[in-house]
Image (cartoon, rainbow, N blue to C red):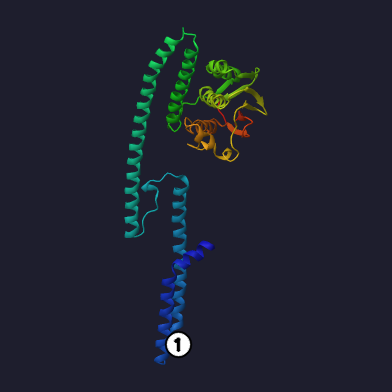
């Protein structure tokens, strides 16, 4: 009924015109002293015909509105799906929409092509830069001096940043490479620990880790990326003490004894580019690592949260639950 009144309101000028016509016709009969009843019949017939046209017009417009709502809700619009135009103005609007859709399709195709070119370029760059990294690592592997050990750690950091570049680019790729299977969490965690073992040793940091004996339904490569990012951050901001890795309430927890996070920064730590007060002090911070972790966890159906107190360490929890999944 509300839509009907809106439709009637939209026809208010036509209804007003009809009302004025009845008034003028009645006034003419009165001025010429004609029988007023003679004008009542055509006015009533005209009113009934007008009401009938209003009702028919309302149902036609309702059907057109439903078609348009279906197009809007589906998010997929083609000119052929639009209601047929009822006048020349609507035909021009239809042509305008078709032109805009064509422009959008061409712009989307160009953006996709540019994106793929960029990904191809940086993928090639990553593979090329890995060659000198591997060469440097090979030259340092027989060296056991403090300088060589620190250089190996720096090389590991460079490799992590290179992988971050690829992850950042592939995250929005339309062709996802997620492979969801059941994996042993311990093998994933041990691989990450092994990657940073040199940093634990060189900096004299302790590691508290016992076998987790947990299976997780996930994509191994992407979850390992998240874990390594979290572990890398924990090591970066821990000056003394150590890191604990354990399972709590179905979540993989990484707890450090580092400098902690300002409570004012906690709500925004997963925003892209946000580094907080610590990042302003540490110019190396990019604000990308935790952003990528959040995006990957969302894509995998996992959760990630951080609790911290400045000066008292940080705990990152990676929730391993999944609401929907498919076995490979």
The answer to which image quadrant residue 29 occupies is bottom left
Q: Nearer the viewer, residue 17 or 312?
A: 312
The answer to which image quadrant residue 181 occupies is top right
Please state the total of marks drawn on the protein image: 1
Q: Is residue 38 above or below residue 270?
A: below
Say whether residue 321 is visible.
Answer: no
Q: Is residue 6 above or below residue 34?
A: above
In the image, residue 290 lies at what x, y percent? 52, 32
Q: Is residue 71 above or below residue 190?
A: below
Query: Which residue position is annotated with label 1?
Result: 36
Q: In the displayed orientation, state which residue is furthest to the bottom.
A: 33
In the image, residue 213 lies at what x, y percent? 65, 18
In the image, residue 222 lies at what x, y percent? 51, 25
Say whether residue 69 is visible.
Answer: yes
Where does the N terminus fall, quadrant-wise?
bottom right
Q: In the displayed orientation, state which residue is furthest to the right.
A: 249
* Secondary structure beneath label 1: loop
In the image, residue 248 lies at what x, y percent? 67, 27
Residue at (45% x, 22% y) in the render: 158
Taking 16 as reference, is 218 left or right?
A: right
Mark 1 nearby-residue class (10 Å; few <14, some 14–19, many ≥20): some
Residue at (52% x, 17% y) in the render: 195
Taking 37 as reference, is 88 left or right?
A: left
């Amino acid at each position: 009924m509300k839509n009907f009144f809106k439709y009637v309101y939209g026809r208010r000028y036509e209804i007003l015109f009809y009302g004025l016509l009845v008034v003028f016709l009645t006034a003419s009969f009165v001025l010429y002293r004609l029988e007023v009843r003679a004008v009542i019949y055509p006015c009533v017939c005209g009113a009934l015909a007008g009401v009938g046209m209003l009702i028919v017009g309302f149902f036609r417009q309702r059907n057109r509105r439903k078609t348009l709502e279906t197009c809007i809700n589906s998010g997929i619009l083609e000119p052929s799906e639009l209601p047929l135009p009822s006048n020349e103005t609507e035909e021009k609007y239809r042509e305008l929409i078709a032109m805009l859709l064509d422009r959008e399709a061409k712009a989307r195709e160009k953006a996709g092509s540019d994106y793929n070119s960029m990904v191809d370029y940086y993928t090639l760059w990553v593979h090329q830069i890995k060659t000198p990294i591997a060469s440097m690592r090979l030259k340092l592997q027989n060296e056991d001096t403090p300088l060589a050990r620190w250089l190996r750690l720096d090389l590991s950091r460079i490799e992590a940043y290179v992988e971050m570049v690829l992850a950042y680019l592939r995250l929005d790729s339309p062709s996802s490479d997620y492979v969801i299977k059941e994996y042993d969490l311990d093998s994933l965690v041990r691989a990450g620990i092994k990657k940073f073992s040199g940093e634990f040793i060189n900096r004299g940091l302790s590691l508290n880790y016992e076998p987790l004996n947990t299976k997780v339904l996930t994509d191994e490569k992407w979850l390992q990326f998240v874990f390594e990012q979290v572990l890398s951050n924990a090591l970066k901001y821990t000056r003394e003490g150590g890191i604990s890795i354990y399972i709590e309430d179905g979540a993989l927890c990484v707890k450090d004894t580092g400098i902690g996070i300002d409570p004012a920064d906690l709500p925004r730590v997963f925003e892209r580019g946000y580094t907080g007060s610590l990042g302003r002090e540490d110019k190396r911070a990019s604000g990308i690592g935790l952003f990528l972790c959040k995006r990957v966890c969302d894509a995998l159906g996992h959760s990630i949260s951080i609790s911290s107190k400045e000066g008292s360490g940080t705990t990152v929890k990676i929730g391993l639950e999944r609401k929907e999944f498919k076995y490979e």
